Amino acid sequence: MTPRALQKNKEGFTIIEVMIVLAIAGLIILIVFLAVPALQRNSRNTQRRNDAARVSGLLSEYTTNNNGRLPANSAALQALIGTQLSIYDVTSITLAAATEATGNDAAAAASSNSTVVVVSNATCSDNNAVAGGGSRAYTVTFAVETSGGGSTAQCL
């Protein structure tokens, strides 16, 4: 027999080659499904931090222009902020006195991921608002998403 007659006609892929390609494709899809939610969560948390910093900046400007006074109530605070936030609805911004929201109370008030609590006469301690900051002091407390699906309080 000639060498040409001994050779088989090899066309197409073997089952092993197909299985290897499918395994690699499956790993790539798995990586994408794991990475995308984390990227989206980080993006939302960045927007929340930016909005809280914007609220803090607007309050700083307001207190400078009004002899150290904060807005009188939540409605005045919401009017001050207007439409300058990206992730929060302006009606979710509330103003609380230090006696109403201190320590874990402020963190609990901001734990919904859609609420910002401005606490007057308070300072931040371990991401919680604590009383005793003086009449010109305020904190901006909000919540960010965690990788476990819950939320944790942040304080500016």
Image (cartoon, rainbow, N blue to C red):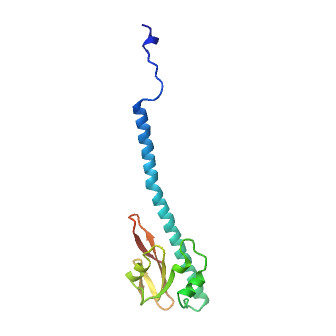
Q: Nearer the viewer, residue 33 or 45?
A: 33
Say how many tags the image has. Answer: 0
Q: Residue at x 60, y 76 (%)?
A: 84
Residue lying furthest top? 1
Residue at image point 41% right, 79% down: 107
Q: Position of residue 86 (x, y in %)?
A: 57, 71
Would you identify the image quadrant in which residue 62 lies?
Answer: bottom right
Q: Quadrant of the N terminus?
A: top left
Q: Position of residue 151 (x, y in %)?
A: 41, 70
Above or below — where is 119 with respect to 84? below
Question: Is residue 148 depicted above or below 14 in this figure?
Answer: below
Q: Dividing the picture into quarters, in which one does residue 71 lie? A: bottom right
68 to the left or right of 111: right
Instruction: State the image coordinates of residue 49 (x, y, percent, origin top left).
Output: 51, 72
**Image height check: is 35 above or below 144?**
above
Give me the residue at 44% from left, 38% from top: 21
Residue 10 in the image, given as x and y percentages of width and height: 46, 22
* Residue 120 placement, left or right of 67: left
Residue located at (53% from left, 89% from top): 73
Q: Is residue 33 above or below residue 50?
A: above
